[in-house]
Image: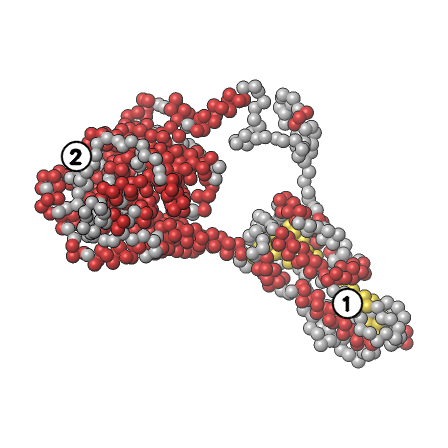
Amino acid sequence: MHSVGTISSRRRPSELGDGDLSNGEEFLLNPDEDLFLDLDGGVPPLHPDCSAKRAKDITKGLLPILDWLPKYKIKEWLLKDIISGISTGLVATLQGLAYALLVSIPPIYGLYASFFQFVTYFFMGTSRHISLGPFAVTSLMVGSVVLTMAPEENFKGNSTGLNGTAVDIVAMNEYRVLVSNTMTVLMGIILLIMGILQIGFLVRYLSDPLVGGFTTAAAFQIFISQVKLILSVPTNNYNGVLSVIYTIIDIFRNIGNTNIADLIAGLLTIIIVMLVKEVNDRFKHKIPVPIPIELFVTIVASGISYGVDLETKYHAAIVKDIPTGFLPPQPPDVSMFADIIGSCFSTAVVGYAVAVSVAKVYATKHNYQIDGNQELVAFGVSNIFGGAFSGFFGCTTLSRTAVQESTGGQTQIAGFLSTLIVFLVIVALGNLLEPLQKSVLAAIVIANLKGMFMQVLDVPRLWRQNKTDSIIWVVTCAASIILGLDLGLLAGLVFELATVVIRTQFPTCAALGNVPGTDIYKNIKDYKNIEELSGIKIFRCNAPIYFANMDFFKDRLKAIVGFDAVRVFRKRNKALKMIQKLIKKGKLRSTKNGVLTDLGVDNKAFESDPEQEPEEAEDVEVPTKEVEIQVDWNSDLPLKVIVPKVTIHSLIIDFGAVSFLDVVSVKGLKSIVKEFMQIDVNVYIAGYDDEIVQKMEACGFFDDTVKKDILFLTIHDAVLFIQMKASYGNVQDLIFETISLMKESKEPLSFPETDELEEHQGAIYKLAS
């Protein structure tokens, strides 16, 4: 192995005393001694009080409030947090009521979700700006499971005398609430386990294009689910494949039953809310606090509904009952876990991925760090606690978090104050919203979908930047609409991972050339004035090499070097057998020096000995000793066998982009090296990583034939070595083959196959040197 660095060693860590490293002294790391590092990469303190300090750090890690609350700047931040908390609380209240409709449960449970989950996050969360609570996408995903587990048909008719067509609303709502609570607790448990095991990295498989396509599809399904509330038309409850299509068909089938009062209220709400939100966005630098248009619309709509009595006169669908106060804790139904765990896992992962993405945006903006694993723990505990008190799954939404941050929120004190607003509504003001039309809440939901629908504009940009990411976006969106959110997310994830596998299975491979006057080597197709070195081919594969792409690697290598080493070797063996036959027939002669002479055959490939007199030529019919035959395989041979020409004497494989190998690829690489050695082409590996060499050693790559001296740290090192070797005459384009011609032998010569080939080539190399 060439250019191998060494690490100087002095003493082991166990031999060092305090202060021995003050002068930067190097020491030996003995693999038999354990060196424990803390999570920050440093050496743990060796002082007696390390356990107390460690306990304090762990406590602060589990309860981040102990870190930021003592540093709270009351004079600078309190007023801003109060304004932000009030604004966010109003938005959280209305979104809680509206998103409860997506879960298909009474609106009051949306308020419970907005309140309880933040109570624990206030102490355990690491984000200072996200507003924890219901999210439209996850609410719809929970609602789809609720409708599956508790369809309306299961509550039609009972022993109390219902006529078989009426629905027991009370029993249905109670069971649906139980399903949503159970799901919330189970999702909390899943997130908590992921946090304890520190496997939050799993959400990294949800790329931005995948999440964008998924949330856009979810926005479309939310839109359809809320349109039926705005129109107030009856539809069946569908779930699974093509459910949104069936819902659209039902809406158009029953559109004649539209309630005009609900339709007008819904359309006016959508128009007003979207216009004022546009004003808030355009003049956000001039308006100190965004206009809480949802609150104003809700108050006005509730007043109109109550004053006109829309329910009685126009049969408008209203919220009706919003009980005051809280419900006692309710345990989950553990028997449901087996039926809903798949949906719970996907919903929990989506909610966490969205929440952490939003949290990281504001953490970067305000220069602080987010602990992903602690967020898992915080979300898990929050949802377990919220689910026990009848809340449904919550994470965060960009719109609500944007209100908290844009109105000046500095810490989660603003979030705490927002929960006080929700608390007041639950214990005192909820009954004032009972006349509110459901179409108004549905319209508020639709108006807040604008951001998710605008993600469609990402598709053309992604197409220009990376077509694969654009296709992932489209496939995930289409699959989520057609198959449903759960199966759609799974299909999108599988497709995304398939694109990664395909890109590594069929990587970009190229021949490299030298930039004149430098030690830089680039793709000869991408740059002008790049020179390929004479007799040297440099091959680069821009991907890991493993079992799936090993065959492709071999095919691209053959295409770039211009020949198949195995085919060349077989053709040469066949040509040598024909040479033997020609010698026996007297058409070729061997001289004393082993050089063949021509007897009437145009043989440009074999040179005669100018100093050999004709009368001194040996009789080929009675050979008495072993004869050397010198063959120039790149010349025209006087044979019927066409031997492919080999114009290179050295091959350099650039491992600069190879991040890992497996057993199959190591075995394949070794066979490649030996195949080229058979035709006297030396193979070198450059730009390798130490871990790659370790893997090659573990898999038995190196032996007496393939040695470590083929390894070079850079391509240029390998090139210089080859050129130096050529300057000393060690590189030969001519191949010497040895044929034993026994006296009066009529048997054709046998040529070694795979096992005997190495010994045969050894003799050739001795002759060549």
Tell which of 222 and 721 is nearer to you: 222
**Residue 464 visible somewhere in the drawing:** no
Q: Residue 58, how many percent across, how many down?
A: 47, 27
Q: Toward the viewer: 220 or 309?
A: 309
The x and y percentages for residue 148 are 32, 49
- Identified at 40% across, 36% down, the residue is 380
The quarter of the picture where residue 296 lies is top left
Location of residue 654 in the rendering, given as x and y in whole percent from the top left corner: 61, 52
Question: Where's residue 670, x and y in %?
Answer: 67, 55
Residue 1 vertical placement versus 29 (above, below): below
Q: How many marks?
A: 2
Residue in the picture at 28% in, 25% down? 79
Which residue in the structure is indicated by mark 1?
Answer: 751
SS at circle 2:
helix
Give the image quarter of residue 764.
bottom right
Question: Does residue 634 appear left or right of residue 156 in this picture?
Answer: right
Q: Quadrant of the C terminus?
A: bottom right
**Identity, as a three-letter code, of the amino acid under mark 2:** Leu
> Gap between marks 1 and 2, in whole Å?
99 Å
- Residue toward you, 396 or 430: 430
Q: Does residue 75 lie above or below 238 as drawn?
A: above
Could you tell me the amino acid type at mark 1?
A: Phe
Q: Residue 739 falls in which quadrant of the image?
A: bottom right
Tell me, for residue 432, which label it has, or none.
Answer: 2
